[in-house]
Image (spheres, helix red, strand yellow):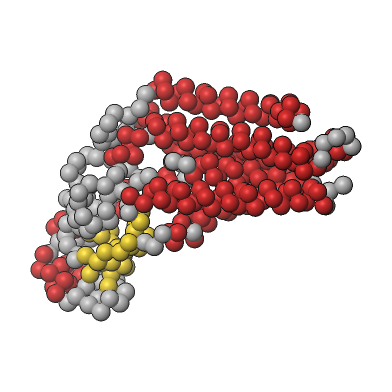
Amino acid sequence: MIWLTWRQFRAQAAAVYGLLAVLAAILVIAGRPLSGVVRLTPADSRLYYAGIVVTYLLPAVIGVFWGAPLVTRELEAGTHRLVWNQSVTRARWMATKLALTGLAAVAAAGLLSLVVTWWAGPVDAASQPSTVPVGADIGTDVPDAESFAARISPLLFGVRGITPVGYAAFAFVLGVTAGILLRRTVSAMAVTLAVFAAVQIAVPFAVRPYVIPAAQQTVTITSANISKLGVNSSGEVEELAVAGPRGAWVLGNETVDATGRVVTAPSWVAACLLPPMPSEPQGRASPSGPVAEADQECLTKLADLGYRQRVTYQPADRFWALQGTETAIFLALSALLAWLCLRWIRNRVS
């Protein structure tokens, strides 16, 4: 049974692993960015973002092209009956397919994540925490430095560490489940892609922020820590934010009054500041911008009236805790779907 499963699966496996080998060779030959990197070269920048895109796409490819056709092509052709009429039970047939192909799926995702995480290590290190506290003027010690996304941010979290393994396992078993329920390869592929994409979009915003209670700090608003300032045509402040800790995932940035109630900054604050300039990546303001020239008396008055900025965030040191929790959730969902596949094959498929 193992040999038969491998014979049916080897073409897809060769295609994916071949592409992974090519990508790994390119990254190794190109070499990692230097430690203490300040700004990526154009070539390194292309490799950096290509690694992100490929790592996000691989689980979807596995679900659509490995998972969805795994059973449906045999159900459509009727070849499953030839195996079941021999000495192989339905449960053994299904379990072998899930185990062999599933292991190949998680191994592919794990290897890709390992290579991409290794190559991007110096870039990720540039965004990691320093000793500068929340709300301080962080990240401006190197004026020409590029502002890199933190590895705990929604952009990078899913393509670093062990989460790609959980995503690949879930996408694969999701594809198999869709195939068994729909019994049509093309329909199963479409449903797998749609559901997996929806999960990938929903989890970073509806699940991940609440897995571990977020940290909060309330800081005084100063000209040194303002990172965003938005003023409408009427001169009223629409948005005000301060810089969060380096390497953290900022979930909320709210102005509060002396009682702790969320409020909008007073309209007279806008008159104290020059018109806002376009912010740099991640919304950081330039030290030479309008905030750097703010009227200190105005901000002092704001502080005296009790206005503060409350920052809600997930610290960088929770990266592995969140990784482990999210991966465990996806592996548990994968196990549940695998159990459903086994039950459905035994009782519903003829």
Where residue 101 appears, as percent x and y from the top left, is 66, 35
Where residue 187 appears, as percent x and y from the top left, is 74, 47
Judging depth in this view, the residue of 281 and 221 nearest the camera is: 221
Decide if residue 180 is in sight here.
yes
Outermost residue to the bottom: 259
Look at the picture and state if 331 lies above or below 258: above
What residue is shown at x 87% (from left), y 47% (from top)?
350
| Left or right position of 75 against 62 | right
Which image quadrant for residue 19? top right
Look at the picture and state if 18 lies above or below 137: above
What residue is shown at x 50% (from left), y 32% (from top)?
111
Judging depth in this view, the residue of 345 and 263 nearest the camera is: 345
Decide if residue 181 is in sight here.
no
What residue is shown at x 60% (from left), y 52% (from top)?
333
Which image quadrant for residue 241? bottom left
Outermost residue to the front: 87
Where residue 196 appears, as percent x and y from the top left, is 60, 49
What residue is shown at x 38% (from left), y 48% (from top)?
319
Judging depth in this view, the residue of 226 and 275 nearest the camera is: 226
Outermost residue to the left: 297
Where residue 185 appears, as percent x and y from the top left, is 76, 42
Where's the N terminus, which quadrant?
top right
